[in-house]
Image: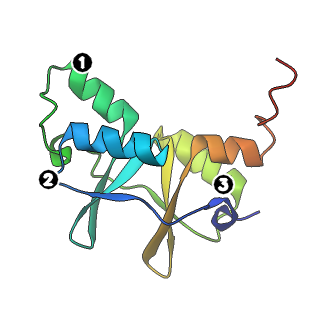
Amino acid sequence: MSIKELITRPPVTISSSASLKDCAKLMRKENLGSLLVVDGDTPKGIITERDIIQAIADDYPLETPASKVMSTNLITADASTEVGDAALLMTNHKIRHLVVTEGGKIIGVISLRDVARSLGLITTDASFW
């Protein structure tokens, strides 16, 4: 199975000048753990729940722009990448969100949870709990 099959929607983006509070609100609204940070249409990085938590723990004000705490080294994989290979890539880079590209364009972001679920490592059926 390719990672393209794990994408359920286009990436949700936010401006690099958006505040941490704005990022957290959008993540909550969209039920996401990460946002693609952009300047106009140009991807600049990714901000995750962990980035926001670490910033707050480091006493950054909630008005701090996303650009100050985002990860700028976007790790990407082609849409045709097999899920197992994506899992290894994410593990090797110690990331939980992987940017998916096709033809050089970003088409989505998948999470480690998406990958684990597709590999049968976790289930959405909580009846056994």
Snapshot quadrant of residue 122: top right
Residue annotated with mark 2: 17
Label 2 with label 1: CB-CB less than 8 Å: no
In the image, what residue occupies the spot 33% across and 40% down? 25
Within 10 angstroms of label 2, few (less than 14), some, or many (20 or more) residues?
A: some
In the image, what residue occupies the spot 21% across and 71% down? 40
Snapshot quadrant of residue 59: top left
Describe the element under mark 1 as helix, strand or loop: helix
- Residue 110: numbered disc: none
Give coordinates of residue 26: x percent, y percent. 35, 46
Q: How far apart are marks 3 and 1 (CA)?
A: 33 Å
Within 10 angstroms of label 3, few (less than 14), some, or many (20 or more) residues?
A: few
- The quadrant of the picture occupied by the N terminus is bottom right
- Camera-nearest label, 2 or 3: 2
| 44 and 93: which is toward the camera | 44
Q: Residue furthest bottom?
A: 103
Q: In this view, does 112 lie to the left or right of 51?
A: right
Give the mark nearest the N terminus, 2 or 3. Answer: 2
Snapshot quadrant of residue 3: bottom right
In the image, what residue occupies the spot 64% across and 67% down? 4
Q: Is residue 63 left or right of residue 129?
A: left
Query: Where 54 falls versus 8 (above or below)?
Result: above
Query: Where 106 falls versus 47 (above or below)?
Result: below
Residue annotated with mark 1: 57
| Residue type of the residue flagged with mark 3 | Asp
Give coordinates of residue 55: x percent, y percent. 22, 28
| Residue type of the residue flagged with mark 2 | Ser
Could you tell me how many numbered marks the image carries? 3
Describe the element under mark 3 as helix, strand or loop: helix
Residue annotated with mark 3: 85
Give coordinates of residue 77: x percent, y percent. 52, 63
In the image, what residue occupies the spot 47% across and 41% down? 95
